[in-house]
Image (spheres, rainbow, N blue to C red):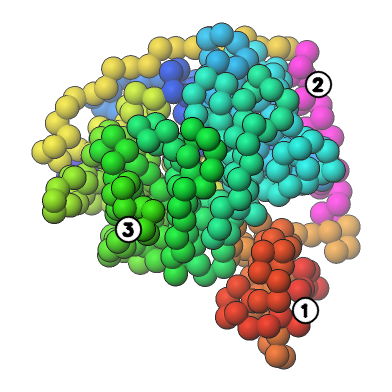
Amino acid sequence: MALLFPLAFRLDHASDGDVQDVALHPSYRLLASALDGGGLLLHVYDSVEAASGSLQLWLGHSLRPFVGAAQPGCTAVCFVSGSGSAAGGSAVAGSAMGALVAADVETGRQAWADAGSGSGGGGGHASRIKAAAALGPHLLVTGDSRGVLKLWDLRRPRATATLEVPGGGITDICWVAGQDALLAASSSGLEGGLSTISLRSPQLLSSWEHHAPVHAVAALHSGRSVVCGDERGRWGLGRWGQLRGGGVAFRTGHGSEAVSALVQCDSTGIVSASRDGSLRACRIEEGPPVEVSSRAPVQAHAGGSRVRLAISGSGAFIASAAVGESTVQLWHTHLLFAQQASSAQGVASPLPKLTLRRDTAATAAAEAAAEAAAAERQQKSQQPGGQQQEEGLCIICMTDVATGGFAHAGTMHSGFCVECIRAEKARRPGKCPVCRERVDAYIERMF
């Protein structure tokens, strides 16, 4: 069994917090890391020797788009071409309060922004942005913790379309270019779902509920097949034409740990990440019958957290990061698929380099603001009652700290964050998302 040597690096910007999401540029060797302290890091990476898997990396820009906000977390990121500079486009980041910021990848300067409606301004999202995906030049889609999808054109000040999908908060979004449509995975309490959305005239085409949260979705075989993964470690496989009738059959996966991310590598290959921190490369042949072949999992991260994945436009590199950690890993995709007969295709052509131009004045101002915000957070944490709780993460969004729950009949189901408690109250008033009992009280914070 071949050994894998990824480039693992620790983000040395502790004041900006830990990783929440990662993205790889579709055309250049550029990695974006979203941090829960409000920071957005852009690194340039290079392949030194593809045969041995050697990689080198250096910091291009350190941005602070959400420093100073009430909840400064940078929760989702993607690259959008066409906007910003003509060459590299923009890195678009979403926040815990529903705000969006697009930064030019060459200069680091802000190119576009929406304040979100969660902070009292803008016409955007009213809650945490959990997923973002590019749809082409200037275009992207974002999804939040309340199940709201918004389509954006970065040449316009506001969203071009808004849709609400059933099944709870959005956990993943997949653009199916061949169908001119979107797939949206969702999670609410102990249930989940999958929805299809047409982009021709934005509308919900179909949706179905699943008895476990669905965390990841991808399309294969030029958009003819759909793969999704749930909280119980199972994979759902279906054909595009069968989705309107709920035609996704879940089968035993590769363990009991939740499937937290999926990325498509080519027409038949995907890489999955599980909550135990492992990555697995698989081939799914169209059939019939459908045939799934995979190699042994690779332990990439410590278990217990959701792992986020991103793939470069050429498919040559994959980035992985566990939410709440400060380490990101870069992998040569062909090494993850090593020892598979169907993957003996050599190394994909390298990506071109992108030269980043630093804006010295803007960088200095951002660093000063970040230091002041970090000092303020440190001061608050030292005050009585200011220390964050450590009970664990919310069982719905798996990102915010669990602070409360739903009280009923002398008992209480806890493990939920304030944002998800409010979302459940609005979506299913009077019912506990765990047991469906009538709720007597919504407890947002326990002391």
Vertical side of 72 occupied by 137: above or below: above
Q: Which portion, as a residue range, is magenta?
A: 361-382
| 44 lies left or right of 258 | right
Vertical side of 128 occupied by 369: above or below: above
In which quarter of the view is residue 38 placed? Answer: top right
In the picture of the structure, the residue carrying the numbered disc 1 is 441
Asked whether 370 falls inside the magenta stretch, the response is yes
Asked whether 266 falls inside the magenta stretch, the response is no
The prevailing secondary structure element of the residues shown in magenta is helix
Q: Residue at x 71, y 76 (%)?
A: 430
* Viewer-nearest of discs 3 and 1: 3
User: Where residue 416 sits in the image (x, y, percent)?
Assistant: 66, 67
Circle number at residue 365: 2
Say which amino acid is labelled 1.
Ala
The residue carrying pointer 3 sits among few (fewer than 14), some (14 to 19) or many (20 or more) residues within 10 Å by Cα, namely some
Q: Residue at x 76, y 74 (%)?
A: 442
Q: Residue at x 72, y 67 (%)?
A: 425
In which quarter of the view is residue 267 placed? Answer: top left
In the picture of the structure, the residue carrying the numbered disc 3 is 247
